[in-house]
Image (spheres, grey):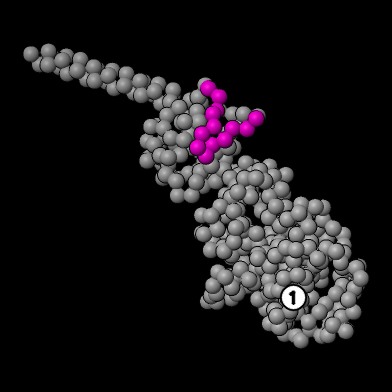
Amino acid sequence: MMKKVTQRIVILVSAVVATALLLAAAAGGIFFYLNAPPDKAFRPTDGISVTAEGEARIEVREGESAGSVGQRLEDALLIRSAFLWNILSRLDEDHIRQGVYVVAEPLSLTATRALLKTGRQEMVRITVPEGVTISKTARILESGGICTADEFLAAASDPEFLAEYHIPADSAEGYLFPDTYLFPRGYPAHLAAKTMADNFFEHLAETRGPGERESAAETHRKITLASIVEREYRVNDEAPMMAGVFYNRLERGMRLQSCATVEYIITEIEGKPHPTRIFFRDLEIQNPYNTYKVSGLPPGPISAPGQIALDAVYHPVATDYLYFRLADANAGRHTFSRTLEDHNNAVVFYTKAGAGQ
């Protein structure tokens, strides 16, 4: 009797073990299949683009859940199973990181997860010089393969983007800090604009000083003036002096008479080549940005002011000067005057070399 019981137990255990092995083999087979790279070409979907070379560029968005990323990867045929992706996401304490990633060839699901957890992205160094306009910035980004110029201009004029940063204008002209950036190729235009705007407002906060506050309208006026100073000064130590001159003219109700604003009209509004000099006929252009014809500040910034111009406007030199003109083109030095008689109007009006050219 005991022998029969033992035999039955052995048979039962063997069956259980066999079943477990079969289930494990089946599970392993399923995992192997679902983990394997898809055998179809990538296809574009929400937040995932495919280049002409067949590379997939994946945007992992700020605050996006792993489940959302997995579903988009499955839709783009980058992984076979969002279900397996979600299971691994729950078991893995290391989270995927925000950014843009490049997949040049099909990867397994686990390899794709490993890539998105590293934070390593394809980066391109992009330098945006001080004094460039937003259109020139867009062309710089496009030439670096970051995003198209049209996409960037659309992102930088999106009403939601402008509202987020309290920019009282139709675009972020003047609010994108000129600097050297590392962006991934194919980076979303709105993220590039956000990075540059965040950088700008960080510098602006440092320039103002801790605890200093001002209205969006007052900030806009100062950024507009800083953009003019940026296009006028050539020697760093003259920038605060120029800011002081412009403040004096504004307080007296005088026109700013900045050649830089006329240059902006010619290049950015009329779409003409950058002039090497401004003629008297140019000063007669009827446009709200022409500070030779209109009193006060123009409607908005005319360039991207750098740190020197921002410092100059927020910390100008107290002076009684009302005029300045270029005295030494080679050295970039200006002559500052208190009266129109001393000013001795120049016959030729020079402009600062085109930024970003």
Q: Is residue 43 magenta?
A: yes
Amino acid type, label 1: Arg
User: Which stretch did the figure color magenta?
Assistant: 40-52
Q: Position of residue 133 (x, y in %)?
A: 71, 57
Residue, disc 1:
255
Overall secondary structure of the magenta section = loop
**Is 113 included in the stretch rendered in magenta?**
no
Residue at image location 78% in from the left, 82% down from the top: 322
Q: Residue furthest left?
A: 1
- Can the viewer see residue 120? no
Q: Quadrant of the N terminus?
A: top left
Residue shown at the point (59%, 61%) measured from the top left = 169
Residue 200 in the figure: left or right of residue 69: right
- Residue at position x 68%, y 55% from top? 134
Residue 251 spot, x, y in % from top left:
68, 82
Can you say whether 347 is above or below 185 in the image? Answer: below
Q: Nearer the viewer, residue 319 or 124?
A: 319
Kindly identify the residue that appears in the image at 12 percent across and 13 percent down: 4
| Spot occupied by residue 104 in the image (x, y as percentages of width and height) | 61, 32
Q: Nearer the viewer, residue 315 or 206?
A: 315
Helix, strand or loop at disc 1?
A: loop
Q: Residues within 10 Å of mark 1 (few under 14, many from 20)?
A: some
Q: Quadrant of residue 300?
A: bottom right
